[in-house]
Each structure stands twice: as structure tokens, then as C-alpha cells.
């Protein structure tokens, strides 16, 4: 599947070369996503590879997600304490931290870290397979490389980023509890009661919904860039880089849209 | 060395190409290619780097689309058939890539099992294992079954690449530079393997090469691709007894059976 945006230099431009290429790129990505849904819901299914990719995306990201989630919990608690203490409201810390972590930090930070770790990995892996003709080899051996390589990875990121988000939220809350317990001698039961009294199902559901969108974005961006990599090793580097940059940019755009939408229905 | 098969079964072409044209931007690579490959025949396509040899077999296997012309494989127009028909057609075509294109995240066993399990889902695990062992024996590399591609030598990778195509029992083989980057002894082994495949699996083949020894030892017919067209076709002897300057230059640079050059 060669992107149409690459063919453009030899045609007459409708507006200008860059604008035409931009719209053709959007068309190519839309086609890529359309093909994903077509292949994802048609048999045969690559169950074994989906589980393998879930393991790669989920389990192998656990150490990094654990560390960053824990540090965010501690740092955010430490940074918020002085402001609340000024008003004598340091007892509100668990509520504030839980709202911040569940509503925004957990999905956003987890997805940004996954975009860097998983997105670049997918972009580089598929890019390298593309330039060394491994994808062509799959195609000519009468197998479906798109189903085996793209569908499995996009499904894995779409399912595992929400799981990592929930996990990262819990670890962040744990970090926050340790810091609050040290400073305010708050019991675990009181922390949990205070923290979860302000969290609604809408907060948790919107957080999971965001993580699903971000996971899908990371998977599609990584696979699209890698699957269409060109020009040897330089192309592999570009694919890995573009996978991260594009998915991070889209995650922020989606965050803004989803927050508007969730606030409107809150 | 295995004796070269010369008994081409019928005169029915398995691949038929008429007035094939292909350009990349302003660069015309193929400019009116006409050729037929007969059942059971090995055709070596010779030409300089960038002359469009690899593009030709990529079009035959449906990896690239032609700009114009007709490319028929087993009577089916490759660029006109549905994706499903193309997939069925590809199960009859084996493609050996220049750099072998082994899946580097999989072991040799998994590389060989990959096309088989996806094309013949009804096979049991024992049948798949048996097929893998059989094809590895054919290429003489049964001991590498659990190795990763990165642990194999260039020649071994080529042979595993050929084994991966043979496991589907193809009727047509497309070899892209099968001896490039190999030492002379390994090249001879690969040439022998190509001849063995033709004989044992009764395949037709297009062998893309600029190695005249490979062409001489493996092909029933030789064609020279130059400036987007076939300059000449015929047996090795017929083609290289030509006085045509372009062909002579090609021949002289390879020093095949050229005692005078060797003595110099």
C-alpha cells in the first residue's frame, strides 16, 4: 500500500504541493484506518499474535509506567500541599490528587509514555520490516501482512493502554498516600474514603474512554508510519520519530476535545 | 553439480508478458517488455544494476502494478484479478528475495511455519513439523531449525529463504539475485539448489542475476534486459556467441570460460 501523497510531485497541484500532500496524507490515513476495521472484523483472527503484542505493549511497559505513576503521585502531592496549607485545606489533598490523577494525569501521562516507548517501537519495527522486504515476503507468500502486523498491534495498544492507565492511576494514588501518610499521618482508610468521595463513574469512564482513544492513536500512528517507511535505514528512523511526534500531537488534540465533551455532559 | 534439467514439459507458457511498461516518476524502467516462460523452464534475466530486472518479477508477483501492458500468470492477469484471486495465485509462486527477507524476530522453524500455517490451516502441528523438517532436509540445513536468522551465514539465509518458498510447493519460482554477495563455492551450492528445485519440484523459474555462472548453470534460456527491453533471448550459448557489442561487453566482464583472460 503506497501512500498517494508520495505520488504527488509528478502531478499538477490543486492548491500547492504541501497542502495537496497534507490532504492526501489524511486520505491515506483514513484508508488505512478503514482497512484496519475491515481486517479486524474478518476471519481468520491472529489470536496468538494479539496476545503476544498485548504482552509486549502491556507487561513490558509495566516498570516504566509504575515508576512514572508513582513519582507523579508523590511530586503532585508535594507541589499541591503548600497551596492548600495556605488556606488550611491540606485535608483536601486526597480529593484533589485523585481528581487530578484519575481525570487527567493517568490517561495523559501513561499515553505520552506509551507513545514514546511503544509507538517508536512499532514504527521502527515495521519500518525495518518494510525496508528489508519482510512485509513484501509475507505478501508474496499468500499471507496477509496487514492483519498480522497492523491489526494485532492496533488492537493491543487499544486494549492495553486503558489497562495501563488504570494501573498507573492506582500506583500514582499509592505514591500520593505514602507522602500524605508521612506528612499528615492520614490512615489508609481515611485516604481512600476522602479520595474516592469526589470521584464519579463519569470520571473513571471518561478516563478509560480517553485511554482507548489514545491507545488506538498510538497504534495507528506507529503502524502507519512503519508500514509506509521508505529509503532504507533513514526511513526507519523517520518512521520511529514520526510515530512518536504524530501520536503525541494527536493525544493532546484528543485530550482537548474529550475534556470539552465530558465537561459539557458533566 | 546436479545435471541441468532440459526437458521442458509442454510449450504452454505459465507466464506471459506483452508490451509491459513501468516508470517511476520520470524514470522509465521497463519500456515494452515481451516474453513468455514455458512450463518447466528456467529463464535467467541478465542486465546491469537498475535495468529493471527486480521490478519485472515484482510486477509478476503483484507487488508492483504495471503502467501498461499485459502480465498473465497461469492465464490470469495479475493486475486485474481480485485480492482473493491474487492471494490464491501467490500460493503457487515462490519468491526468493535478494536479501532473503527472513522474518528476523522468528526462528528458522517459525519462518517456515508462517506461510504454511496461514495457507493450510487444516494441517496438524505434526504435519507442519514434518513439512518443515522435510524442506530443511531438501536445502541441507536441518540443524539450523531453532536458530535465529541473525545467527545464519549469507548462504544459509539464502537457502532458508528458498526453503520458505518451497514449503508451499510453488509451481513458479522467482529468484532475485540468488548468488549476490556470496563466495564462489556458496554460489555454486545455490546454483545446484536452484537446479534441484526445478528438477524435483518441477517448477518454472525466472532467475534475476548479473552472475553469468549462475545463468549458465541454472537456466534453460537466457534473456538480456537493457534500456527497458529484452535485447535478446536464447540459450546461453546462442546469446553469448553474439557479436553484438552490448552483449560482448557483458560477457567479457564476467570472464566466463575465458582462458585468455584467466592467463592474463
Image (cartoon, coloured by chain):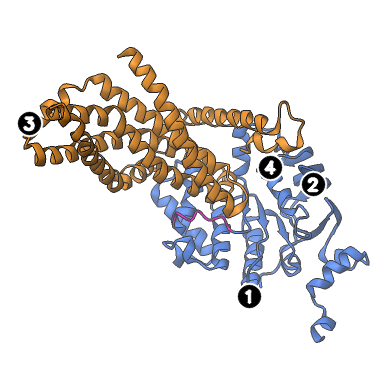
Chain colours: A orange, B blue
Numbered range of the magenta stretch? B100-106
Identify the subunit bearing mark 3.
A
Identity of the residue drawn at 57% across and 67% down: B155
Q: Give the left or right position of residue B163, taking residue B9 as reference.
A: left
- List the residue tagged with mark 4: B64
Q: Measure the alpha-carbon separation of dots 2 and 1.
A: 37 Å
Disc assigned to residue A189: 3
Identify the subunit bearing mark 4.
B
Q: Measure the alpha-carbon separation of dots 2 and 4.
A: 15 Å
The quarter holding residue A210 reads top left
Identity of the residue drawn at 79% across and 83% down: B262
| Marks 1, 4: nearer the viewer | 4
Q: Is residue B104 magenta?
A: yes
- List the residue tagged with mark 2: B27
Specify whether residue B129 is in view: yes
- List the residue tagged with mark 1: B185
Residue extending farthest front:
A86
Amino acid at each position: 500500500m503506497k501512500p498517494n501523497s508520495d505520488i504527488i510531485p509528478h502531478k499538477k497541484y490543486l492548491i500547492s504541493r504541501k497542502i495537496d500532500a497534507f490532504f492526501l496524507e489524511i486520505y491515506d490515513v483514513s484508508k488505512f484506518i478503514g482497512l484496519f476495521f475491515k481486517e479486524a472484523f474478518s476471519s481468520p483472527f491472529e489470536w496468538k499474535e494479539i496476545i503476544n503484542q498485548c504482552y509486549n505493549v502491556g507487561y513490558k511497559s509495566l516498570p516504566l509506567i509504575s515508576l512514572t505513576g508513582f513519582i507523579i503521585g508523590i511530586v503532585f502531592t508535594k507541589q499541591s500541599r503548600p497551596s492548600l496549607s495556605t488556606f488550611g485545606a491540606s485535608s483536601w489533598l486526597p480529593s484533589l490528587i485523585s481528581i487530578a490523577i484519575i481525570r487527567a494525569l493517568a490517561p495523559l501521562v501513561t499515553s505520552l509514555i506509551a507513545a514514546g516507548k511503544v509507538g517508536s517501537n512499532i514504527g521502527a519495527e515495521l519500518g525495518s520490516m518494510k525496508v528489508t522486504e519482510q512485509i513484501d515476503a509475507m505478501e508474496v507468500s499468500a499471507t496477509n501482512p496487514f492483519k498480522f502486523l497492523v491489526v494485532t498491534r492496533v488492537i493491543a495498544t487499544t486494549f492495553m493502554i486503558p489497562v495501563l492507565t488504570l494501573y498507573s492511576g492506582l500506583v500514582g494514588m499509592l505514591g500520593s498516600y505514602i507522602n500524605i501518610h508521612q506528612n499528615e499521618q492520614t490512615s489508609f482508610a481515611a485516604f481512600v474514603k476522602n479520595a474516592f468521595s469526589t470521584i464519579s463513574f463519569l470520571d473513571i469512564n471518561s478516563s478509560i474512554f480517553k485511554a482507548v482513544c489514545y491507545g488506538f492513536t498510538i497504534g495507528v500512528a506507529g503502524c502507519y508510519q512503519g508500514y509506509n517507511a521508505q529509503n532504507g535505514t533513514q526511513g526507519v528512523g523517520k518512521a520511529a520519530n514520526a510515530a512518536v511526534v504524530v501520536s503525541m500531537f494527536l493525544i493532546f488534540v484528543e485530550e482537548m476535545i474529550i475534556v470539552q465533551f465530558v465537561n459539557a455532559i458533566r | 553439480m546436479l545435471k541441468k534439467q532440459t526437458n521442458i514439459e509442454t510449450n504452454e507458457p505459465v507466464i506471459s508478458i506483452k508490451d509491459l511498461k513501468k516508470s517511476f516518476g520520470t524514470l522509465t524502467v521497463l519500456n515494452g517488455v515481451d516474453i513468455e516462460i514455458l512450463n518447466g523452464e528456467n529463464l535467467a534475466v541478465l542486465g546491469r544494476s537498475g535495468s529493471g530486472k527486480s521490478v519485472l518479477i515484482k510486477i509478476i508477483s503483484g507487488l508492483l502494478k504495471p503502467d501498461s501492458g499485459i502480465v498473465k500468470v497461469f492465464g490470469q492477469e495479475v493486475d486485474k484479478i481480485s485480492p482473493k484471486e491474487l492471494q490464491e495465485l501467490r500460493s503457487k509462486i515462490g519468491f526468493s528475495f535478494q536479501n532473503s527477507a527472513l522474518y528476523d524476530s522468528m526462528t528458522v522453524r517459525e519462518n517456515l511455519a508462517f506461510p504454511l500455517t496461514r495457507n493450510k490451516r487444516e494441517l496438524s502441528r505434526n504435519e507442519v513439523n514434518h513439512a518443515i523438517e522435510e524442506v530443511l532436509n531438501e536445502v541441507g540445513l536441518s540443524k539450523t531449525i531453532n536458530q535465529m536468522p541473525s545467527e545464519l551465514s549469507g548462504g544459509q539465509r539464502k537457502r532458508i529463504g528458498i526453503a520458505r518458498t518451497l514449503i508451499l510447493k510453488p509451481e513458479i519460482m522467482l529468484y532475485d539475485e540468488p548468488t549476490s554477495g556470496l563466495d564462489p563455492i556458496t554460489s555454486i551450492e545455490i546454483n545446484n539448489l536452484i537446479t534441484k528445485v526445478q528438477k524435483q519440484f518441477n517448477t518454472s523459474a525466472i532467475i534475476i542475476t548479473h552472475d553469468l555462472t549462475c545463468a549458465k548453470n541454472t537456466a534453460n534460456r537466457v534473456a538480456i534486459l537493457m534500456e527497458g527491453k529484452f535485447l535478446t533471448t536464447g540459450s546461453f550459448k546462442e546469446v553469448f556467441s553474439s557479436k553484438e557489442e552490448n552483449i560482448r561487453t557483458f560477457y567479457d566482464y564476467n570472464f566466463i570460460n575465458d582462458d585468455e583472460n584467466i592467463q592474463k
